[in-house]
Amino acid sequence: MFLRGSIVALITPMDAEGAVDDDALARLVDFHVDAGTAAIVAVGTTGESATLDEAEHCAVIAHCVELAAGRIPIIAGTGANATAEAIRLTRCAERAGADAALLVTPYYNKPTQAGLIAHHRAVADAVGIPQILYNVPGRTACDMLPETTAALATVENIVGIKDATGDLGRVERLRELCGSDFALYSGDDGSACQFMLRGGDGVISVTANVAPALMRRMCEAALAGDRDAAAALNARLDPLHRALFVESNPIPVKWAMAEMGLAQAGIRLPLTWLTPEHQGAVRAAMQQADAG
């Protein structure tokens, strides 16, 4: 198996003007190393990949690899809705020394299933780094079906999928179609515990930004098949799973990281800072998870 456990979909810390904050990025990498997070996804969709230009995107990936210094695997978010751009970003990740790439399905274009296969095969053929598919139809208007995933699982360097549908029935179907060596990661924090108890390998998590040690412990219990322990730990996390989506991700999680003193109050338009009416709910959920 490629990786198992709690993988953080890391925010990209920014200053008040929206510039990437390299000092905060170093703090965040150390924070996750110390918490025992299994891996870091750098510049995924939670990392505001849509508003970083290609040069910034590649620079943040390279800086994360440098900061990690082999202490924690770095998975680079390199998906795009243009195949040529996805290839360029994935090549950047490979040159930087990233351990793998995470590629979201092309958003807005609404490709067919055949188009999805052609897109991901083209990236995998062009760049040898291990690649993880990412299916999040709620944000892309494109759903990669399990049968399409199975077709791509035959490609040697396509090693897993992040499934953010929240459809737990897909876990068994994906495992049946893709085999035991193909990594299955939840992309939905609220159902991730059950996803792992049903045979998944981990979660690529927004919540892990805020409560990494607790997320790690919950994942360890779920992967060990300890339903009671996993459920008890997840009960402490569940308010945070919900609160971090009271506004569009990553608005709430960036506010939470600023509250914890780990990042500045910086985000890029068209996203805006968390509105005061929701701040109390996020703060209360953080307290229940002993975060901050």
Image (cartoon, rainbow, N blue to C red):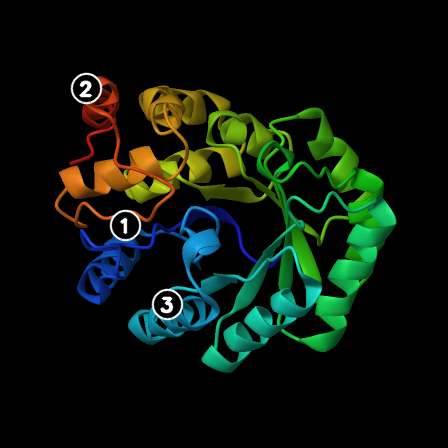
Looking at the picture, tell me which residue is in the foreground, 127 or 218. 127
Q: Amino acid at mark 3?
A: Val
Q: Amino acid at mark 2?
A: Gly
State the quadrant of the N terminus: bottom right
Gap in angstroms between the C-alphas marked 2 and 3: 31 Å
Looking at the picture, tell me which residue is in the foreground, 34 or 226. 34
Q: Nearer the viewer, mark 2 or mark 1?
A: 2
Residue denoted by label 1: 35
- Determine the image quadrant of residue 228: top left
233 over 110 or under it: above or below: above
User: Of helix, strand and loop, which one carries label 1?
Assistant: helix
For label 1, the crowd category at 10 Å Cα-Cα, with few meaning under 14, some 14 to 19 and many 20 or more, is: some
Judged left or right of residue 137, residue 153 is right
Residue 240 in the image: state x and y as whole percent: 33, 26
Gap in angstroms between the C-alphas marked 3 and 1: 21 Å
Residue 31 in the image: state x and y as whole percent: 23, 54
